Amino acid sequence: MFSERLLFYVLLLPFFGLLSLGAPAPGPEPSLSELIARQTVDTSQHCGQWDIVTAGPYTMFLDLWGAAGATSGSQCSQITSVSGSTIAWKTTWTWVGGNGVKSFSNIQLNEGINKQLSQIKSMPSTWKWSQNTSGSVVADVAYDLFTSNTAGGSNVNEIMIWLANFNAGPISAVYNSDGTPQAVASNVSIAGHTWNLYTGSNGANNVFSFLPTSGTIMSFGGDLLPFFTYLTQHNGVSTSQYLVTAQAGTEPTSGSATLTTSAYSLVIN
């Protein structure tokens, strides 16, 4: 009996060996970039006033906050792709009537924010875009970043980095005799371009706007941190402030256009 039972187990050993070889060992946990790559991205068009779409480390906000100031119009946006930290999207808008900004359809970074400026080592960013317009338009294409006294707190400073100014104008505390805004600093060299800096208030917080000294920048690549460094060194912004919001998009006032971003990325280190 014993020998027969032993023989039975000996004969089964190869079978159990095959089972153990066929069962793969648990693999490593997937990285964040792998999880992002696996997810399904909502690439449908959205037109609601407050629609939001999250994809990877970003959220798209329609943000038609000033639509009531228009006689007529609409704006629709859609994410077209996401790969790691790079996102592409498109915004089509048409607005008639009213002198104020109608919307700020934008992409917001959700990772790495709520850091003190003194703790941020770099903010590398790329933004490649193009725009088709119909007739005359009033709009800008810009980064829009906010700082606060506390992490997640109320906005204190708004820092705008304009890549394009289509017949619009930055907020300014002082204007020239011809009605144009007066810069507080000119020909500031940052991220491979020269900028004029304008300052003022939007009624809620301080606004610092960097505008290119000439033309538009349709392919930007550089570090955004030196813009903050300039403000802390020359304009009284404290390094103890927290970066609480980092967005990029277009602010149209009137006209019709389609802004197409083929590649955008921002990382806060």
Image (cartoon, rainbow, N blue to C red):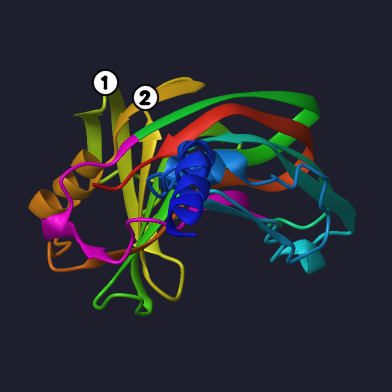
State the residue at coordinates (13%, 65%). 238
Q: How many numbered markers are drawn?
A: 2
In the rendered image, the vertical position of residue 237 relative to residue 234, given as above or below: below
Which one is in front, 268 or 21?
21
In the rendered image, the vertical position of residue 16 relative to residue 243, given as above or below: above
Residue type at mark 2 is Gly
State the residue at coordinates (54%, 44%). 36
Q: Quadrant of residue 80?
A: top right
Task: From the top left corner, tell me how far across and down residue 82 is, in percent.
Answer: 59, 36
Q: Quadrant of residue 110?
A: bottom left
Q: Is residue 222 left or right of residue 39?
A: left
State the residue at coordinates (68%, 40%). 138
> Which residue lies under the disc numbered 2?
221
Dot 2 surroundings within 10 Å: few (below 14), some, or many (20 or more)? some
Dot 1 surroundings within 10 Å: few (below 14), some, or many (20 or more)? few
Q: Give whichever of discs 2 and 1 has the lower sequence position.
A: 1
Q: Are marks 2 and 1 in contact (CB under 8 Å)?
A: yes
Say whether residue 88 is visible.
no
Residue type at mark 1 is Gly
Magenta region: 103-124
State the residue at coordinates (29%, 40%). 224
Disc ID at residue 192: 1
